[in-house]
Image: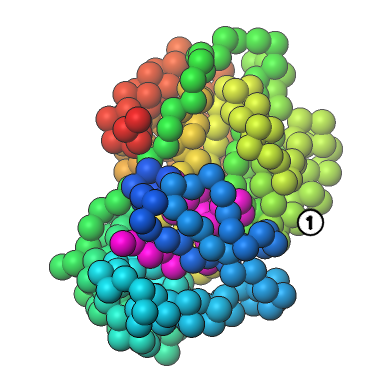
Amino acid sequence: MKLLLTLDFEPEYGGIQRYLADIVRHSYTSNDLVFTATSVRSKFLTGFPCTVRNFNNPAITLFKKTALLSFFFPVLKLILFGKKNITIECGNIYSALLPFFLRLDYNVYTFGTELVSLKGKYIRTLLFLLILKKAGTVYTLGHYSFSLLKQFGIQKQVTFKPPKIVIPKNVVTKKSSEMLHFLSVGRLVEHKGHDLLLDAFKRVDLNQNFKLTIAGNGPEKEKLQKKIAHPKLVQTVELKTNLSDKELQKEYLLADIFILSSRESTSGTEGFGIVLLEAMAYKTAIIASSSGGIPEVVDYDNCARLFDPKNICSLVDAIEVLGNNPAIRNHYINSAEKHLRRYYVWEE
């Protein structure tokens, strides 16, 4: 029996939430169990092959990690009175705090932003290193996150477990139209680089009319809205928050070019970039920064036009090259589809 302990899970939005939920959908059975904590009030989340128990409480809105306390007695009950053969999987390092202090065996998923944030924070770093070294298996999404683990001396028990997706049906390659559509999807936080993206679009020179849609929400929202009010952006850029899955699907279907402008900062980094897989699946040409784990995902410039996030001119150049050349866009789309099907698709 597998038991997943996680603070990140659907229906909440985010790459980690989607990643863990997909693992449950495709590799868990009716004998397994998930303990999670989301803002949804329901005690159980449906649509999964196993029971997903949601420990919602008022304190979660103030400090989500308090949900770990809610896991304590149910986990203890399972260990003492339930099935003895339980494999505990922890959705991130924080989620491993409980089995670590209870001296239980566990495996743990790790992510780039969480690992980068350990640098320079001695007390937390020491605790998290102890948690990682105690783990039976440490899951990592790719070689970038693995390189971060190696810096901390964690490598012997590492297993690669990259994200995968289900390819949507009936998606066709976009045909040129009067309007060129750009799309960027991601939480509105500093390391996603949306401010860099907007500064670049003030300078681009394209052969046709264009529109940039930024889909996401987060603490940088007001700052970005002020930048979008700039005379050179107000008519061409739209910020859309809280899109449903169907609404986001429409944006992908409409987009000609997807842009991921992430950069590494003290607040985080792009350890993988699951949105890149979605863009590939929807036959959208990709422009992406060369930071974090992004180059590996797009096969090092074979599936996307990479740019240096420290050089805005390289982003402007990438936008203009792909924006003005449909043949180059189609080359990246075709290469990306082959790469996606080879490495990042769930078997049906």
- Quadrant of the rendering where the N terminus is positioned: bottom left
Q: Is residue 186 above or below residue 2?
A: above
Residue 283: x %, y % from top left: 48, 22
The residue lying at 43 percent from left, 21 percent from top is 333
Amino acid type assigned to the residue bearing label 1 in the image = Glu
User: Which of the 4 image quarters holds residue 158?
Assistant: bottom left
Q: What range of the chain is rendered magenta? A: 1-22
Residue 60: x %, y % from top left: 66, 73
Indicate left or right for 14 with 221 as reference: left
Farthest residue to the left: give it: 156
Q: Is residue 91 in view?
A: no
The residue lying at 81 percent from left, 43 percent from top is 230
Q: Is residue 8 magenta?
A: yes
Q: Of helix, strand and loop, which one carries label 1?
A: helix
Q: Is residue 314 above or below residue 94?
A: above
Mark 1 packing: few (<14 Cα in 10 Å), some, or many (20+)?
few
- Quadrant of the rendering where the C terminus is positioned: top left
Indicate left or right for 326 with 243 as reference: left
The residue lying at 48 percent from left, 56 percent from top is 51
**Residue hosting label 1:** 222
Residue 279: x %, y % from top left: 50, 32
